[in-house]
Amino acid sequence: MSTPHIEADVGAIADTVLLPGDPLRARFLAHALLDAPVQVTARRNMLGFTGHYQGQAVTVMGGGMGIPSTAIYVTELARTYGVRRIIRVGTCGGVGEVAIGDVLLAQSGSTDSRFNRMQFGGHDLSTCADFPLLRAAVDAAATQGLPARVASVFSTDCFYDGDPQLLGHLRRHRIHGIEMETAGLYGLAMREGFAALAILAVSDHLEHDTHMPAEQREQGLLAMGRLALAAALLA
């Protein structure tokens, strides 16, 4: 049985899903890191592939940009396909004492979106990563020799023309990454009962106007994919 947005048959999607935003990044990661990847969905060109990593089935699928798009795919993955573990692999803007290429393991996600409040009686929800997954990612990063730091991130609904005071608020609260999905993913994980983690590479520093070169983005994506797969095996 498919869903309105995912055409895969039940059983074709693994219990563990790596979720980049870009479907082309999903295809790249699947073919670079998985054994015998098979495309299982392409509805609306949101590509998904299932293969194996060290004998364990893993799906890599795009989730789109922003909390609303991510929420559609994540909700269907959890409710229809019974996915138990979702690891977002992507990029973020850096704030404060981080550098281009730093890998952030998002322990919490704040947001200017009302997405979680609508499901929580209008109250603030403290959205957090799954601790066993976070701990496994910390351990795997150390084993791989990959510098990674546990950090808080902020998920915004505005790519352009947001709150002009936002960077100051983030610095004051020692939030080091800004992107568009993590808080929604973590809120859904709490409500739907699956484990979630976001692993993010700093691709642009919002205060220094520095940017990651395209080649470094590709290599950083591979490093995050390897880290996510290792964490999934350890958790």
Image (cartoon, rainbow, N blue to C red):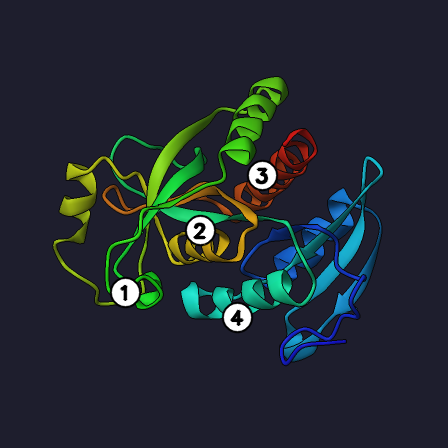
Q: Is residue 131 left or right of residue 17?
A: left
Q: Nearer the viewer, residue 136 or 120?
A: 120
Q: Which residue is mark 2?
A: 186
Tell me which amino acid carries mark 3. Answer: Met
Q: Are marks 2 and 1 in contact (CB under 8 Å)?
A: no
Q: Which residue is mark 3?
A: 224
What residue do we see at 74% from left, 70% from top?
Answer: 41
Q: Which residue is mark 1?
A: 121
How far apart marks 3 and 2 lie (CA) works out to 19 Å
What residue do we see at 52% from left, 57% from top?
Answer: 192
Crowding at label 3, few (<14), some or many (≥20) Cα neighbours within 10 Å? many
Tell me which amino acid carries mark 4. Answer: Ile
Crowding at label 4, few (<14), some or many (≥20) Cα neighbours within 10 Å? some
Q: Nearer the viewer, residue 201 or 208?
A: 201
Q: Nearer the viewer, mark 1 or mark 3?
A: 1
Regarding mark 4 in the picture, which secondary structure is present there? helix
Tell me which amino acid carries mark 1. Answer: Gly
Crowding at label 2, few (<14), some or many (≥20) Cα neighbours within 10 Å? many
Q: Is residue 202 left or right of residue 37?
A: left
